[in-house]
Amino acid sequence: MAEQDTITVSEYIAEQERLEKEAKELFPKKFDICSNSMGYIRQPVYSCLTCNPNPSEEAGFCYSCSISCHGEHNLVELFTKRHFRCDCGTEKFKATKCKLDPKPAGSINELNRYNHNYLGRFCWCDILYDPSKEESTMLQCVVCEDWFHDTCIGITPHNDDFDDFICRDCTRAHPFLRRYASHPLFMIALSEKDGGPKATTMVDCSKKDTKNGDGKHSSDTKGKSVVTEVEQEVDVVTVDDSATRTIVSSTSSTATTVSTTTIETSTTTVSVSLELSQDSEQLQTSNQGKRSLESTEDTAAEERGESGPSQIKKLKLETVPCKLKDQPSDAYPDQEMNLFATEGWRDLLCQCDDCTTLYTKENVSFILGEEPIFEDEEDDDAETSLLESGMKKLSEMDRVKMMDGMLAYNKMRDEIRTFLAPFSEQGKVVTAEDIQAFFTAKMEQRAEGKPNFF
């Protein structure tokens, strides 16, 4: 055996300790439960180029299966993917069975969606990812969850200056995002549609003089969203015929009038909406008017044989304008737009009925808030060495079994020492063949019924 192929016992132990440390860093969590039973969730996902190397064969699996079922394969770490169910052991992996959660024959996850990431390719350049050679910084789009090289994006802000990235494909596919882009919480990287793909211009909207909802200039609104919302609890008085009704605030002395038509006495619920701007004048009416109205209604009710207070209903009046309509039009309609968003940008997005319907239609409802990510439990034993883990398990055994195990271990240790002694005395190298011959002989003794501790 060549000298470079030999290794001393101390070097072997040091190498094992190094591998243990590396394993603790790479696999800090437990990997004994397949996430398939949890359904479609957002979770860390991996793909296997050993099992599924070709287009149309894309598949992915959870963290636990990446170790327990595909530990010796060529894997690609995709990081988080939303609405994904583990494929391990399904029809996607015909040659590999899931060791953690065997699936019924022919099972498939029909709602999973795949892209070129599952083949180890990322970004618009579609280059096969090689972590040992990759020098660029890669950014994940918060919408499509693909990864992009900063060199392919072009001009980018410093990593500490933004929280989320939205790629140009997604701003093109979801034009409503471009309407919010001029807000101070965004930075815009622009490129020409007919030019090169890389962004060549950066617009930092936090440094622009923007206009808020009432048309007034404001240069210090970063992190704030101007929203007009009015909520009042009011008393509504029902009458027999068409009339001009007065709505009186129950929490203040202010009031206003609202013209209505065809009001029925059987009405029990009344919906009222007011369009109020930020500069609306406060509603003013005297307490005397309120008392006069209540007195008139009580009298009318008594003439009908009814009690006045029974006609007063509580109503919550709210007006929530569409934030999207208040946004300026796309300032760069002829250019491609990558967005770099800072903390709080999701709070800008409108949640009115029309916009909520739009998000559902475009399959981006998740954009309204940060999504929970499923992660496996922390492995409490990850920080302990193999020796410490072994001793811990030994201490948990039945005392009789523990003593038998310790005796067997000591006997095995003594026999290995006896076997290795001649090599040490003669300065010979212990080869793999020598070790294999030793254990083969012990297994033969065991098969013949001879006493041994192997």
Image (tube, rainbow, N blue to C red):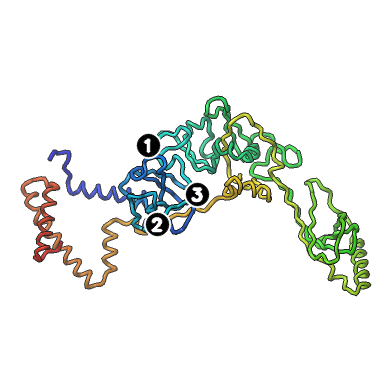
Along the line of sight, the residue nearer the viewer: 353 or 348: 353
Which residue corresponds to the image point at 66% horizontal and 47% vertical from the top-left?
Answer: 355
Between tags 1 and 3, which lies in front?
3
Disc 2 secondary structure class: loop
Q: Quadrant of residue 403?
A: bottom left
Looking at the rendered structure, the kind of residue marked 1 is Asp
The answer to whether any part of residue 165 appears in the image is: yes
Which residue was labeled with disc 1? 130
Q: Which x, y percent locates residue 429?
A: 11, 45
* N-term-proximal mark, 1 vs 3: 3
Which residue was labeled with disc 3? 82
- Left or right: residue 104 compared with residue 184: left
Asked whether the beta carbons under mark 2 and mark 1 sit within 8 Å of each other, the answer is no
Marks 2 and 1, how far apart at CA: 27 Å
| Few, some or many residues within 10 Å of mark 1 (<14, 14–19, 20+) | few
Which residue was labeled with disc 2? 34
Looking at the rendered structure, the kind of residue marked 3 is Arg
Disc 1 secondary structure class: loop
Disc 3 secondary structure class: strand
